[in-house]
Image (cartoon, helix red, strand yellow):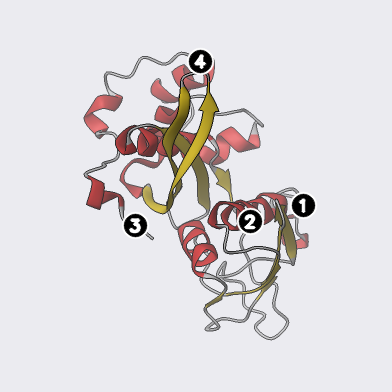
Amino acid sequence: MVSAEEFGEKIQPYEAIEEWKPRTRLGWLVKEGKIGSLKEIFDMNMRIKEPEIVDALLGRELQHEIIDINMVQKMTDAGRITRFRVVVVVGNQNGFVGLGVGKARQLRIAVDKALADAKLNIIPVRRGCGSFECGCSEPHSIPYQVRGKAGSVDVVLKPAPKGTGLVAGDTAKVILRYAGISDIWSWSRGKTSTTINFAQAVFDALRRAYRFVSVSEWGR
């Protein structure tokens, strides 16, 4: 894992939010203060098309980390072109996480693209305590078992009792930590050494978890 500070990369200054000129209706609603949280956006089933929306709503809670940097090539009429591929995870460690991929010839531009992509792909994380061994009502794990897949990688996340920790690979630990999950059991198969597929499989599992409503949320 590589910290973004090693490359001099920083989150967009919050002073720049004041100069932000929204290009979508949702952006104007956020800037005018009519929408005050990301939860409202997902409750209305609206799509985020501007990364500044996430900056405006999460502010300094938003953190990010580079989890993979790789060199990729493609063949063109002018010859073989080499570019950087960067995978970035963003989150507030309290129920929201995003995963993004960026490609560019320059590393800094690739990081910026990945960070913007992660903000556009940010999702709410359904947390809870689905372990029969624990039974507490604190959102330290997930409410039920979920499965995610990307490429050849298949990942299963299972609720764990409090104090278990993150029993998962290093890449999965980073994503789960930024999502605000502290206890979980996991199972995986496939080529998990391919970091981008492993990360996307874990992210896919968290995204699928939000498609179901748990019993504790009935009637809300």
CA–CA distance between discs 3 and 2?
27 Å
The answer to whether residue 37 is visible is no
CA–CA distance between discs 1 and 4?
29 Å
| Contact flag, marks 1 and 2 (Cβ < 8 Å) | yes
The answer to whether residue 187 is visible is yes
Mark 1 vs 2, N-terminal side: 2
Question: How many other residues sit within 10 Å of disc 3, few (<14), some (14-19) or many (≥20)?
Answer: few
Question: How many other residues sit within 10 Å of disc 4, few (<14), some (14-19) or many (≥20)?
Answer: few
| Contact flag, marks 2 and 4 (Cβ < 8 Å) | no
Instruction: State the residue position of label 4.
Output: 24
Mark 1 vs 4, N-terminal side: 4
Viewer-nearest residue: 83 or 58: 83
Instruction: State the residue position of label 2.
Output: 126
Q: Is 29 left, or right, of 47 in this rendering?
A: left
Q: Nearer the viewer, mark 1 or mark 3?
A: 3
Mark 1 vs 3, N-terminal side: 3
Instruction: State the residue position of label 1.
Output: 212
The location of residue 60, given as percent across then percent down, is: 31, 45
Instruction: State the residue position of label 3.
Output: 2
> Identity of the amino acid at label 4?
Thr
At 25% across and 26% down in the image, what residue appears? Answer: 16
> Identity of the amino acid at label 1?
Phe
Mark 4 lies on a secondary structure that is loop
CA–CA distance between discs 1 and 3?
34 Å
Q: Is 113 left, or right, of 12 in this rendering?
A: right
Mark 1 lies on a secondary structure that is loop
> Identity of the amino acid at label 2?
Arg
The location of residue 154, given as percent across then percent down, is: 72, 61
Mark 2 lies on a secondary structure that is loop
